[in-house]
């Protein structure tokens, strides 16, 4: 049952975006991504809403309360796009918020996690009008950068309805996939589905038992099968795996930090990095 739910979803995840001219295929996603560069996360939310509205993609808002962010915000908003019907759902999520700076403003947040946000918009375009056998929800999470508050609120509101989840965090920075399914032991089927799609696409995919935390933790903690995905340059994917899982045998020099982790959460995470 789980594999039948998850496998078609991964095919959609790696499918080509809607047909466009070669120039637009590159320029349009970059324009969309650039529009997420805003002074505040509520402004980033409004830019995302305009993007969905311009494409005729209906969405719902889920508002929630949270501990204060560095800039004092205590209310967050998730956006939810629903396709298909059924008693249970496959959730595909990514956080749209960027790291708030204590002195005010945001980092640009293009790799983390604007690029994943644009991927979800393109998948929503691909799913629109598709005859699905299952309910699929695309969820744009708020407040990932302050304790995964958006995904926690989403899971709390309907965890019994979620059959499996796929979380995208870090993209636009490489052509190899690092992923983690957690340690709960209930994600074998979704992992098999992912590996089948990796093989079909001839994509380098590397499983990390100690994968960096993101909104996937909200699903893991609720016992929901989940996989978290990040795209990196191939060398960075290997270096990150060694850093997280290799221990004293990693072969990495002491204090080594993979390049992408020196970029995210800093002013260097800008459009020029994509």
Image (cartoon, grey):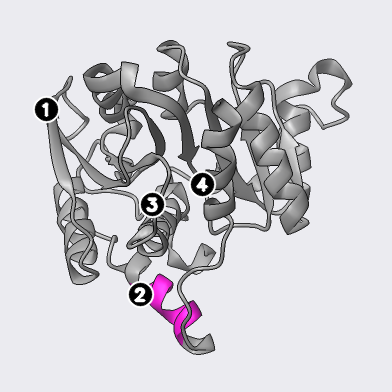
Which is more foreground, mark 1 or mark 2? 2
Residue receiving disc 1: 74
Disc 2 to disc 3, C-alpha distance: 15 Å
Residue receiving disc 3: 109
Q: Secondary structure at mark 1?
A: loop
How far from the left and from the top, in percent, is residue 129? 33, 63
Tell which circle, 1 or 3, labels the residue nearer the N-terminal end: 1
- Residue depicted at x 67% and y 46%: 177
Residue receiving disc 2: 31
How far from the left and from the top, in percent, is residue 159? 32, 18
Disc 3 to disc 4, C-alpha distance: 10 Å
Q: Secondary structure at mark 3?
A: loop
Q: Give yes or no for residue 25 being in the magenta stretch.
A: yes
The residue lying toward the viewer, choosing from 126 and 168, is 126
Disc 4 to disc 2, C-alpha distance: 18 Å
Tell which circle, 2 or 3, labels the residue nearer the N-terminal end: 2
The residue lying toward the viewer, choosing from 126 and 177, is 126
Q: Secondary structure at mark 4?
A: loop
Disc 4 to disc 1, C-alpha distance: 25 Å
The residue lying toward the viewer, choosing from 173 and 181, is 181
Tell which circle, 4 or 2, labels the residue nearer the N-terminal end: 2
Mark 1 surroundings within 10 Å by alpha-carbon count, few (fewer than 14), some (14 through 19), many (20 or more): few
Tell me the magenta residue range: 24-31
Residue 2's disc is none
Which is more foreground, mark 3 or mark 4? 4
- Residue depicted at x 26% and y 26%: 154
């Amino acid at each position: 049952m789980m594999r039948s739910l998850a496998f078609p979803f991964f095919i959609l995840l790696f499918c080509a975006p809607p047909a466009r001219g070669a120039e637009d295929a590159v320029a349009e996603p970059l324009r969309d991504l650039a529009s997420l560069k805003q002074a505040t996360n509520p402004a980033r939310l409004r830019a995302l809403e305009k993007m969905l509205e311009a494409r005729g993609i209906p969405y719902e808002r889920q508002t929630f309360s949270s501990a204060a962010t560095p800039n004092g915000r205590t209310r967050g908003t998730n956006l939810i796009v629903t396709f298909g019907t059924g008693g249970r759902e496959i959730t595909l999520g990514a956080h749209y918020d960027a790291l708030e700076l204590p002195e005010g403003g945001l980092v640009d947040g293009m790799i983390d996690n604007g690029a994943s946000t644009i991927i979800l918009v393109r998948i929503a375009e691909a799913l629109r009008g598709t005859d699905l056998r299952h309910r699929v929800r695309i969820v744009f999470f708020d407040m990932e950068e302050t304790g995964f508050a958006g995904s926690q609120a989403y899971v709390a509101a309907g965890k019994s309805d979620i059959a499996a989840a796929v979380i995208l965090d870090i993209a636009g920075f490489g052509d190899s996939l690092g992923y983690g399914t957690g340690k709960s032991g209930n994600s074998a089927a979704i992992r098999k589905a992912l590996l089948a799609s990796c093989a079909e696409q001839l994509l380098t995919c590397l499983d990390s038992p100690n994968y960096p935390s993101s909104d996937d933790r909200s699903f893991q903690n609720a016992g929901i099968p989940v996989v978290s995905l990040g795209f990196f340059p191939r060398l960075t994917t290997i270096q990150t795996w060694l850093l997280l899982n290799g221990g004293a045998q990693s072969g990495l020099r002491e204090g080594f930090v993979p390049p992408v982790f020196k970029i995210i959460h800093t002013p260097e995470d800008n459009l020029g990095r994509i």
